[in-house]
Image: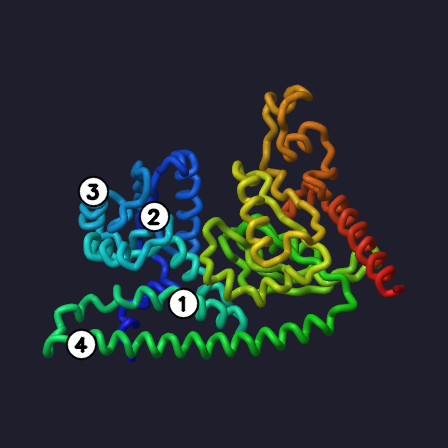
Amino acid sequence: MLMYRHSQSNLVAHEAGKTAILVALVTPQQPLTKTEEYLTELAFLAGTWGLKIVKLFMQRLDYPHGATFVGKGKLEEIAAFIKVEKVDYAIFDDELSPSQARNLEKSLACEILDRSLLILNIFSMRAQTKQARTQVELAQYQYLLPRLTRMWTHLSSQKGGSAGMRGPGEKELETDKRIIQHKITRLREKLASITQQCMIRRKGRADLVRVALVGYTNVGKSTLMKLLSKSDILADNKLFATVDATVRKVVLNNHPFLLTDTVGFIRKLPHTLVECFKSTLAEIKEADLLLHVIDASHESFQEQMAIVNQTLAEIGAEGLPRILVFNKIDIIAPSKEDITRTAQAIDTPVEVALRTGRYSHSYNGHPAVFISATKGLHIALLKESITKEIERVQVTRYIKASY
């Protein structure tokens, strides 16, 4: 058995009941309001994994401390709290370097997670299909490889032997690295084989128009998928409720099409996950139409839209036709200030819809529809918009086939 497995408990789904603290920095690039918002999201991530948050720690720094992420005084404050409260996990909102994680583990005497590793844990817990499990396992090993030294600090004193000779700890560490590199190679080969099978299946569905749901995590994609396809699909108020791509045949106004629900995006989505999930995300890239679902009730929905657009650009899907679906308008209460806003004021698309009662119009060159998937509000407008776009795709296909 590999020695690193003694520290692998933070790489698998964890049982509920453990406690955690959250740590983030307020920097010139990330003001206090943004840090608080990101910590709220991090707490939601931790809760999804089954952890109970007992305290938040923030510190103002120009940039993260190279050795411990936070400064010496804040580190001592955190360590004292963890010791008294017997906290199980310390979770940091940014990705930690291997040396930072190692130093923090020594100083805080608890399990250390960064945002990337926490997301990997949730993906591991959510993955159901062979493809998703392979993708997550590959991403985990890629994350683990440069951090193996951290797992082997207990062997640092075993450096016996003559000058220039390596001790048993170093030899075993190199052995583990070779084993993990071998596992990564095998997983890539396995994933390539699964990807090829998926491509063959997609080719078999080429005659039907393909529509893909995209969006930030927890915006209501799965709820909308369930509503449109009338099928029994998990729709949970948790982050990354969907990891596996789900495809259903839908018929709207005598127009059949394939509707795909894919993994939600998030701020600072680990690069290894984006790379490993490219085969799943190909369902998005090869779609004829995107339904970009947006949580209209979130105060930073425009930033979330930008993150989704950035991820779409990374996978080569930024130029695809799309409908902007602003969801959750049922939980927005327009204020008197919103309603009486002058025509010269700068409005968000959500404020315009609420004030004017126009729940279907254009925004940034794309059709935009304002709905509530849970309440069924304005779903007819969405179906009408989808039907128009499907007809456009069918006409374009007919013209191309004629030449």
State the separation of the CA atoms marked 2 and 4.
43 Å
Secondary structure under badge 3?
A: helix
State the separation of the CA atoms marked 3 and 4.
38 Å
Secondary structure under badge 1?
A: helix
**Residue on which disc 1 sits:** 142
**Residue on which disc 4 sits:** 166
Give the image quarter of residue 393: bottom right
Label 2 packing within 10 angstroms: few (<14), some (14-19), many (20+): many
Q: Residue at x 77, y 65 (%)?
A: 208
Secondary structure under badge 2?
A: strand
Q: Amino acid at mark 2?
A: Ile
Q: Nearer the viewer, residue 249 or 365?
A: 365
Q: Identify the mark at residue 53; answer none if there is no mark.
A: 2
Cβ–Cβ under 8 Å for marks 2 and 4: no
Secondary structure under badge 4?
A: loop
Judge from the rendering whether residue 54 lies leftward or rightward of residue 168; answer left or right.
right
Q: Mark 2 or mark 1: which is in front?
A: 1
Quarter of the picture containing the C terminus is bottom right
**Residue on which disc 3 sits:** 77
Label 4 packing within 10 angstroms: few (<14), some (14-19), many (20+): few
- Image coordinates of residue 35 in percent, x first then y, are 40, 39
Q: Identify the mark at residue 368; answer none if there is no mark.
A: none
Cβ–Cβ under 8 Å for marks 3 and 4: no
Judge from the rendering whether residue 80 lies leftward or rightward of residue 350; answer left or right.
left
- Image coordinates of residue 333 in percent, x first then y, are 59, 31
State the separation of the CA atoms marked 3 and 2.
17 Å
Q: Amino acid at mark 3?
A: Glu
Image height check: is 183 above or below 401? below
1 or 3: tag closer to the N-terminus: 3
